[in-house]
Amino acid sequence: MTAWVIQMMVMVLSVFTGSSQGKRDKVLYCSACKAIVDELNHSISQVDPKKTINVGSFRLNPDGTMKDKKVPFARSETHLSELLDGVCNSMSDYALYVDPITQHKQYRRFAPRSSASTDDFPDFKNFQFDGPEASNDIKFACETLVEELEEEIISVLSRDRQENVHEELCSRVSDYCEDSSRANEEL
């Protein structure tokens, strides 16, 4: 009888703990995904386009030659991995932004980059600064996304064509953001 009671208690607890984890905040994770793409694209744009790196095998072939090739450093797997290690440190420059017209919420960068002009300051009245907890939330979301999607992020950003990176990574791969093409189909 006691074994049956213990089994029932374990089943009930497993149901409650499974449902208490809940869903992730779509606004937070969508914004974190877009912020990762923006920060990485900015860092990539700061690299000298002429800089290259040797990739490939460093083994000698039987004829004494070595097979390797040079690729642009900015979009190399090595460089992207290094950037991913520190991308979430810039999440303290983001805060919750509420669009005054649509009331749509998303996290946006409020701090200008060091290379930006002083005319690039956003209007702070639509930002909600909720203290360090808010920046910790987006930083945690960023770290979670980087951990879960590291290979996909590197794969998408290493391609030369960078037209719809936000849509590819944040809508199709991670499914945190609503795909704009699907949103238009629903209308």
Image (cartoon, rainbow, N blue to C red):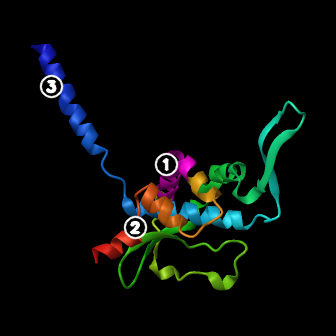
| Residue 32 visible somewhere in the drawing | no
Question: At which x and y percent is residue 65?
Answer: 88, 38
Q: Secondary structure at mark 1?
A: helix
Residue closest to the eye, 49 or 141: 49
Residue closest to the eye, 98 or 162: 162
Examine the rendered structure and indicate whether residue 130 appears above or below residue 71. below
Which stretch did the figure color magenta? 135-152
Q: Which of the 4 quarters of the picture holds residue 119? A: bottom right
Q: Which residue is mark 1?
A: 144
Q: Which label's residue is closer to the chain start, 3 or 1?
A: 3
Mark linked to residue 8? 3
Examine the rendered structure and indicate whether residue 85 appears above or below residue 164. above
Q: Which label's residue is closer to the chain start, 2 or 3?
A: 3
Task: Give yes or no for residue 86 being in the magenta stretch.
Answer: no
Q: Secondary structure at mark 3?
A: helix
Instruction: Give the spatial CA distance, label 2 vs label 1.
Output: 21 Å
Q: What residue type is disc 2 on?
A: Asp
Q: Secondary structure at mark 2?
A: loop
Instruction: Give the spatial CA distance, label 3 vs label 1.
Output: 34 Å
Residue contact at pointers 3 and 1, CB within 8 angstroms:
no
Q: What residue type is disc 3 on?
A: Met
Say which residue appears at 41% left-offset and 80% top-offset: 99
Question: At which x and y percent is residue 97?
Answer: 45, 74
| Residue 72 visible somewhere in the drawing | yes
Q: What residue type is disc 1 on?
A: Thr
Q: Is residue 103 left or right of residue 10?
A: right
Q: Which label's residue is closer to the chain start, 2 or 1?
A: 1
Instruction: Give the spatial CA distance, label 2 vs label 3.
Output: 43 Å
